Amino acid sequence: MQDLTIKVDFDRFPPRHTCDGEEISPRIRVAGSDAPYLAVIMDDPDAPRGTFTHWLVWDIPATGEIPEGIPREPRISHPVSAIQGMNDFRRTGYAGPCPPKGASHRFFIRVWGVGKRLDLPPGAGRIELEDALAAAATGYGETMAVYGREKVLKAPPGTRPRI
C-alpha cells in the first residue's frame, strides 16, 4: 500500500470549518497517490461516547487537492464529483468539529487512494465504506488537527460584570 502525504492549511481548525462558523469543509492536499480515486474519513477519537465520524466521502477523482467547500448533498458534481455518506450527526456530507465546550479534541483526516469506483450508494455508513476500502484501497495517509471550544464562565448570581 502506498504511503500518502496528507496536508491541511492549519494545525488548529479555524472557526470557519467548525460548528462555531460556517462548517465549510477544508482544503486537503494529497501527494503520493497514483490511484484514480480518493476517499476520506474525518473523525474525532476523543468524543465522549467514542470515535465520532464527521465526514465520509468517496469516488473523488484523484488530483493533488480536494478543494474546500464541498456541498453537503449525497452526490455532488462541483467543485469535484464525489459521493458522500452519513456522518454521526445523521446527515450526509461534512460536519465540522464541535467538541463540548471547554474540551480540545483531535480530528483525524484519513485519505485513501482507491483503484476503482466504490459500489456504495450515497448515504452509506462508515462500516460499509471501510469494508469497501479494505478491498479496493491502494494507498493511505492521514493528518490531524485540533479544535477546542471555549467554556463560557457565568458570573455568580447577584454580581455584576466588571467593565
Image (cartoon, rainbow, N blue to C red):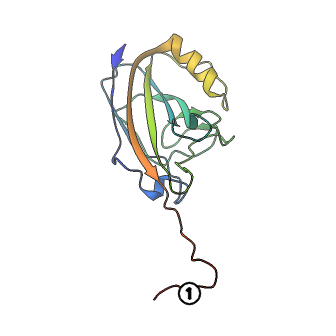
Pick whichever, 145 or 69, lies toward us. Answer: 145
Q: Position of residue 139 (x, y in %)?
A: 39, 18
Residue under numbered circle 1 = 160
Pick whichever, 45 or 138, lies toward us. Answer: 45
Residue 90 is left or right of residue 53, and the answer is: right
Tell me the residue at 39%/38% (across/down): 144
Q: Say how many tags the image has.
A: 1
Tell me the residue at 54%/69% (across/down): 153
Considering only vertical position in the picture, is 163 above or below 157? Answer: below
Q: Quadrant of residue 106?
A: top left
Q: Quadrant of residue 124?
A: top right
Q: Position of residue 111 (x, y in %)?
A: 43, 28
User: Looking at the figure, which quarter contains the C terminus?
Assistant: bottom left
Considering only vertical position in the picture, is 159 above or below 74? Answer: below
User: Looking at the figure, which quarter contains the N terminus?
Assistant: top left
Q: Position of residue 25 (x, y in %)?
A: 49, 47
